[in-house]
């Protein structure tokens, strides 16, 4: 396993972690100031400062972009909705290319409004990714399916296990991989096996860390700093690296009541410490 | 599939559904008053009114007891803790026998305090169930593992899919089965297959219904009345019955901000309506 204390350049900050108090230019400058060499920006933050400016600032600082957040949200109640999602996803691929991202992260979407047909939503996701791949593959942008925790199956993503994501990758082929976020998958009894399966096929594109707090007070915005919860992060990272993963460790923390309220430079400092000590 | 509108006797009320405003004797009388023929009581409510009295009232009204809630909570930080759990679980078996329950529901427990070892917790669960089976099997009390939603993996149950529960049943043998609660398993892409597997081995012991609300505002106590959420309950019930399930449909709703605040007789009336119309 890689010794993270000696590999500070592998730390990536997902910009959601400090998004409440800093704009994207502030985050880029703040990371550079602390020697953080990689980020994963969100589309709305990029839109806010302008794509050209974002791309220029990232390039100026020489930052690695571990992923671009995010494409997906494929299922819709009608064809017009699916077409709008398809159009928007192609724009997301273009933006990911512009900022030099290593992959476009896909949060695939849940049930269309009023629907109880999760199998149908999953089928729409499959078709949506297949279509987007036809655009992304020749453009050279990799797509990374992020399986989300089953508690998001209805409203955010109906791909809820790494096994499901791997099945899609196996079916749809080259240019499609997975983003493994410990928060979403730590509970899965098949996790080690599915990481190995993804590694064997070289589609482990990204690795995200935070922690599962006990108790968890909110389904979306009560995620913990690494080390403050119950996830055995080194074990999962060990499975990733034993399976050939050699890219960044991306910190992504949604925390409305704690980390989002703190001074962003302090948050980044603590991310660096925990990255080196407990990941 | 059974026509529930013509089979009112299959409706069971898990007493948690109306526990905030009624004691167990009130719930028993309230169910009897509305022609509800089955309940699933909780241990603390039984203890509050006394086991003998609870058993007598249930018998007087001729109520079926679809399950007894609950045994489990096997993992502990040390041997003394595991022994205390084992002792308590034997008492739960005795109580389940006294009230004439069709099974003792097992919520197996999560990580011991301070632990990040979910594989170890799962191993403790396996051993705990094996030991309890030696007591329950000759006594004639069936044990029903209830896989809980993965969002409870840390603090309530580290058996999080029906597949895991089925694996335990296959390993540990006669007298062990599963309680399938749509709230916990509706998202699982392998659900139909695992229900069929359980049915083939005749260990589908219980079926619980409520609904998944969007948004869900609390991890534990924001469950919905059947029909108010996104779960395709008839589809899952169809899989159960196609697999040979012929017991009750048990309504279990944890709802601190809505159903627990309402007048219990009204809640029971709505349970009866929804049972007949949307389950």
Image (tube, coloured by chain):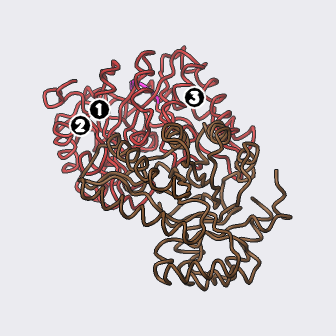
Chain colours: A red, B brown
Which quadrant of the figure has residue B269?
bottom right
Q: What residue did someone put label 1 on?
A: A249
Q: For numbered disc 1, what is the local secondary structure?
A: strand
Question: How far from the left and from the top, in percent, is residue B271?
Answer: 71, 71
Q: Are marks 3 and 1 on the same chain?
A: yes
For the residues bearing labels 2 and 1, Cβ distance under 8 angstroms: yes
Image mark 1: chain? A
The foreground one among A25 and B139 is B139
> Residue at coordinates 60% horizontally, 55% vertically from top-left?
B181
Which quadrant of the figure has residue A278?
top left
Question: How far from the left and from the top, in percent, is residue A68?
Answer: 42, 33
Residue B181 in sight from this viewpoint = yes
Which quadrant of the figure has residue A273?
top left
Give the crowd class for mark 1: few <14, some 14-19, many >=20 residues within 10 Å.
many
Front position among marks 2 and 1: 2
Q: Are marks 2 and 3 on the same chain?
A: yes
A192 on left or right of B196: left
Please give the label number shown on residue A90: 3
A32 on left or right of B27: left
Q: What residue did someone put label 2 on?
A: A279
Start and end of the magenta stretch? A100-104
Q: Residue furthest front?
A: B138
For the residues bearing labels 3 and 1, Cβ distance under 8 angstroms: no
């Amino acid at each position: 396993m890689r010794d993270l204390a000696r590999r500070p350049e592998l730390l990536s900050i997902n910009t959601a972690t400090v998004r409440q108090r800093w704009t994207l230019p502030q985050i880029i400058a703040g990371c550079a100031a602390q020697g953080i060499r990689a980020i994963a920006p969100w589309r709305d933050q990029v839109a806010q400062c302008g794509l050209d400016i974002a791309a220029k600032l990232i390039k100026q600082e020489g930052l690695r972009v571990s992923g671009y957040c995010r494409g997906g949200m494929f299922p819709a109640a009608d064809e017009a909705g699916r077409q709008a999602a398809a159009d928007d996803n192609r724009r997301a691929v273009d933006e990911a290319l512009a900022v030099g991202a290593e992959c476009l992260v896909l949060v695939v979407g849940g049930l269309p409004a009023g629907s109880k047909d999760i199998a149908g939503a999953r089928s729409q996701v499959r078709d949506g990714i297949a279509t987007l791949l036809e655009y992304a593959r020749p453009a050279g942008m990799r797509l990374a399916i992020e399986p989300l925790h089953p508690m998001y199956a209805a409203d955010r993503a109906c791909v809820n296990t790494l096994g499901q994501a791997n099945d899609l990758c196996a079916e749809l082929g080259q240019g499609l991989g997975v983003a493994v976020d410990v928060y979403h998958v730590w509970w899965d009894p098949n996790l080690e096996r599915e990481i190995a399966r993804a590694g064997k096929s070289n589609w482990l594109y990204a690795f995200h860390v935070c922690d599962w707090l006990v108790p968890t007070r909110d389904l979306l915005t009560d995620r913990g700093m690494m080390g403050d919860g119950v996830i055995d992060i080194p074990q999962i990272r060990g499975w990733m690296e034993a399976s050939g993963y050699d890219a960044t460790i991306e910190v992504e923390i949604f925390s409305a009541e704690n980390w989002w309220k703190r001074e962003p430079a302090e948050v980044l400092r603590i991310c660096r410490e925990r990255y080196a000590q407990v990941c």
